Amino acid sequence: MSNENYLANPLIHTDRKLGASNSQWVQSFDCTHMRPLIICRGPIRKEAMDVFDEMGIHNYGILLSEKDSITYQNALAPELRKLTDPSRIHRVPDYSGADKSERAQRIQQIINIAHTNGYNAIFAGYGFMSEDAEMVEAMENAGLNFMGPCSYTQRSAGMKDSAKRTALATGVSVTPGVNNATSQALFAKYGKSDKDLEKCAKSNKLEVDFSACNDDEEKALVLLAASYAAGIDIIDATDIGLALQIEAKRMLTEKPNNRFRLKAIAGGGGKGQRILQSANSYEGATLEDKVEKAAACVPSLVVECLIELKTNGVGDNKNVLIEMNIDTTRHQEIQVIGNGDWCMTMGGRDCSLQMHEQKLLEVSVTEEELNEA
């Protein structure tokens, strides 16, 4: 079947060279000076290449992993058929690294590729790699323009636990659940008093200052942040799994007909998530028996979430959320853009048709539908 209708569709493809506009204001958004390095893969990479070309940005480059170029050597990606200049294709072992150490190496490798080849911007796509505050901060410090939210925004809203804390602090409702499993694990392992936390810091040679903390939770976050910065584990995945198992038992008892969702705080694109089945889906003489069976798999599910996002290494933030899984809701996404002084929405889309947490279809929604929702 011909793809001519797709290629000629003005709703998809158009001349995006803003420098040619009659409006001086529109001309100010001209991007032809940019030389982006595309570090994502798959269809998003191809879409980015098409849009960059339409914007008059032709000197972009892409990363190519060993998996793409060797493992799937007979399945040449469409973008490789289009980009025939080998000097703009940069080979890396993989896109993100297997653990914290490898991620740091990959980030530095990407920075070196950008500097060596004259790229001045980084495009990481959507979700997963684009939601890595450490990577974004490294790009910023290297003088590269990251095409997406800055590292400050990433830390405030990119990590799922920070995003929920930010939402709650501003009076925005969130999905019911627990977002402080790491704090709970810390308290269970070391105690909750100032003396206990100071002892933990001292024994692990961590410099912490609790003077600005308003409560135990903030003290735990300060101590945990110090451990991440030092690259050590004061709690591990086992501790977090046990803490979440306790919370899961409580939640399963309160709502035995509900399923719950475990989510690692980093990444996107549906990665690092697992479903915890309802208590009543298990057999048992009593509700307590059913809850025990349902909650028994929580520690292993936590490890699965972390491994899938490659955040199970020493010094990684291993926080995992547990939330009520709302089966009947619709997945609406709203695009928001701003600069700190103003913000505006750029429309919405319904992404409810999914399989294995991946979007299969996105449908633009009207303003009337958004108002009704």
Image (cartoon, rainbow, N blue to C red):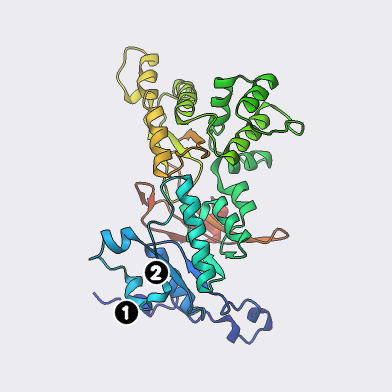
Place residue 285 in its image quadrant. Answer: top left
Residue 231 visible (yes or no): yes
Residue 154 in the image, given as x and y percentages of width and height: 59, 51
Does residue 328 appear left or right of residue 175 in this picture? left
Q: Which residue is mark 1?
A: 4
Callout 1: SS: helix
Residue 364 in the image, given as x and y percentages of width and height: 47, 62
Q: Which residue is mark 2?
A: 46
**273 shown above or below 337:** above
Residue 77 in the image, given as x and y percentages of width and height: 31, 68
Callout 2: SS: helix
CA distance separating discs 1 and 2: 17 Å
Disc 2 crowd rating (10 Å Cα; few below 14, some 14-19, many 20+) is many
- Of label 1 and label 2, which has the lower sequence position? 1
Q: Which residue type does callout 2 highlight? A: Lys
Does residue 21 appear left or right of residue 112 in this picture? right
Residue 194 in the image, given as x and y percentages of width and height: 70, 22
Query: Observer-nearest residue: 242 or 292?
Result: 242
Q: Which residue type does callout 1 highlight? A: Glu
**291 shown above or below 303:** above
